[in-house]
Amino acid sequence: MDKQQLALTVIEKLKQEYPHTACTLDYDEAWKLLVSVRLAAQCTDARVNVVVKELFARYPSVDALAEATVEQIEEIVKPCGLGHSKAKDIHGCMVMLRDQFGSKVPDDFNALLSLPGVGRKSANLIMGDVFGKPAVVTDTHCIRLCNRIGLVDGIKEPAKVEKALWKLLPPEETNDFCHRMVDHGRAVCTARTKPMCEACVLQDICEKNI
């Protein structure tokens, strides 16, 4: 089968395996997801979900977090690693939201990219999960699985994998597809241990580029 057919088959098999999928970062407002996704770089979502409880309790709005100092933010978020750079980005992002966007998270992809610390992965996550628009989030799980399955061939750069997936996936399937790739990457097609191919729902169609 060609890559388009392969993608559609992967979508259907993962839907059956993971009927309910979603972002594993806890949030109830768009700006909180922006903060959490920045903290999630080189850190587990589980740890981020714990750390942000204190952060959001102390600074419960965009304006409150914008008025905090980088040092105050860093003191709370340092368990997530890269504390100073993450705190600086979060502070700058909140200041820009307050001053340029009326303390609201914009629903425009390029506007999101203009925010400090927001790259294509984060912007796509916001577009998909918050605003319900087509979005391709190429995190490490998605990139690894796409290469192993054969949806892309030896492409490791997130932007290039994203570009390839836009051509293969129906727009309405993009967001959930990426979440299911994370689900499958954590549960079966793992990175740090041997993938459990014998238990994989994709074993009959996977190219197994491990």
Image: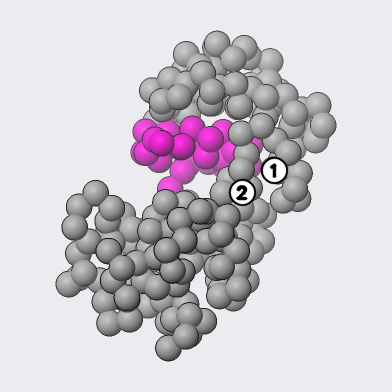
Residue that carries the numbered disc 2 in the rendered image: 120
Query: Residue 157: x percent and y percent?
Result: 51, 53
Q: Residue at x 61, y 57 (%)?
A: 128
- 92 vs 129, left or right, is right
Query: Residue 138: x percent and y percent?
Result: 50, 55
Three-letter amino acid code at disc 1?
Leu
- 46 vs 39, left or right, is left
Query: Residue 124: x percent and y percent?
Result: 61, 53
- Name above or below for residue 82 compared with residue 196: above
Residue that carries the numbered disc 1 in the rendered image: 113
Q: CA distance from mark 2 to mark 1?
A: 7 Å
Q: Residue at x 36, y 71 (%)?
A: 149
The answer to whether residue 54 is visible is: no
The front one of 171 and 132 is 171
**Element marked by disc 1:** helix
- 197 vs 183, left or right, is left
